[in-house]
């Protein structure tokens, strides 16, 4: 059976593209049924359009509460028989509506070796703390910020790197490889 992914993103969408490429190249047997985006101007929306992927774009401030828009998202996820919810640069905490419907089936990628450098600008945090090592973590999502159970991590030695750009480039390369690999493993376990 073809597995259905929903990807949640708020920004550039390089991870979204890497996953879509892996599907196009036959590395990942799945389909992206839906992109969920909370920022109408995000670059990822154009990327989805070019690929013909359905997008649900919303503005949180148009809703009275997180529950209101999450209820709508859950309806859409159910409509598309979503097997796995993949957060890829979605800059919002997941609330109770989504967690009660999909906990254990929502994953996130974060640019640090969690539990180090949770939250925003993890690369900046690593630089500021003069860390010699950082990395990438894929983890299950719970109600906290970057606190869910770790699935897989890859470390990156940054002791000889020159500045943020180089570190970010290397982090993204790791992310794009790691996310498709973890998604593939998880989908194989879903019956
Ligand atoms: C990635 O670095 C990811 O780890 C973090 O947000 C960034 C998204 O980048 N959660 P992109 O939009 O996929 O290019």
Image (cartoon, grey):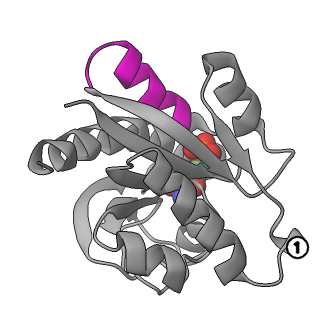
**Could you tell me how many numbered marks the image carries?**
1
Outermost residue, top side: 25
Whether the residue carrying mark 1 lies under 8 Å from ligand 1 is answered with no
Q: Give the magenta-colored segment's residue range.
A: 16-28
Answer yes or no: is residue 141 visible.
no
Q: Main secondary structure of the magenta part?
A: helix
Q: Is residue 54 above or below residue 187?
A: above
Q: Residue under label 1, please give it.
A: 61
Instruction: Report x, y in % for residue 162.
Output: 58, 46
Residue 3 location (% of width, % of height):
28, 37
Asked if residue 123 is among those painted magenta in the image, a careful observer would answer: no
140 to the left or right of 94: left
Looking at the rendering, which quadrant does residue 103 occupy?
bottom left
Q: Residue at the spot x=69%, y=18% of the render? A: 50
Whether residue 80 is visible, yes or no, is yes
Residue 153's x, y, as percent?
26, 59
Give neighbour class at mark 1: few <14, some 14-19, many 20+ (Cα, 10 Å).
few
At 71% from the left and 24% from the top, the residue drawn is 49
Horizontal side of residue 74 vs 100, given as left or right: right
**Which of the pair 22/59 is nearer the observer?**
59
**Residue at the location (22% across, 63% down)?**
151
């Amino acid at each position: 059976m073809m597995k259905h992914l929903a990807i949640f993103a708020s920004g550039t969408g390089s991870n979204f593209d890497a996953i879509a490429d892996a599907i196009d190249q036959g590395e990942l047997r799945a389909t992206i049924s839906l992109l969920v985006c909370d920022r109408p101007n995000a670059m990822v929306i154009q990327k989805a359009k070019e690929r013909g992927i359905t997008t649900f774009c919303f503005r949180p401030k148009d809703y009275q509460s997180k529950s209101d828009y999450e209820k709508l998202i859950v309806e859409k996820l159910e409509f598309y028989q979503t097997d796995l919810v993949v957060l890829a640069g979605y800059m919002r905490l997941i609330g109770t509506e989504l967690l009660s419907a999909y906990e254990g089936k929502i994953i996130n990628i974060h640019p640090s070796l969690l539990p180090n450098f949770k939250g925003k600008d993890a690369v900046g945090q690593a630089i500021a703390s003069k860390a010699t090592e950082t990395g990438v973590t894929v983890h299950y999502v719970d109600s906290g910020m970057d606190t869910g159970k770790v699935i897989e991590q890859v470390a990156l030695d940054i002791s000889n790197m020159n500045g943020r750009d180089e570190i970010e480039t290397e982090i993204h390369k790791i992310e794009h490889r790691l996310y498709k690999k973890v998604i593939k493993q998880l989908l194989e376990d879903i019956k």
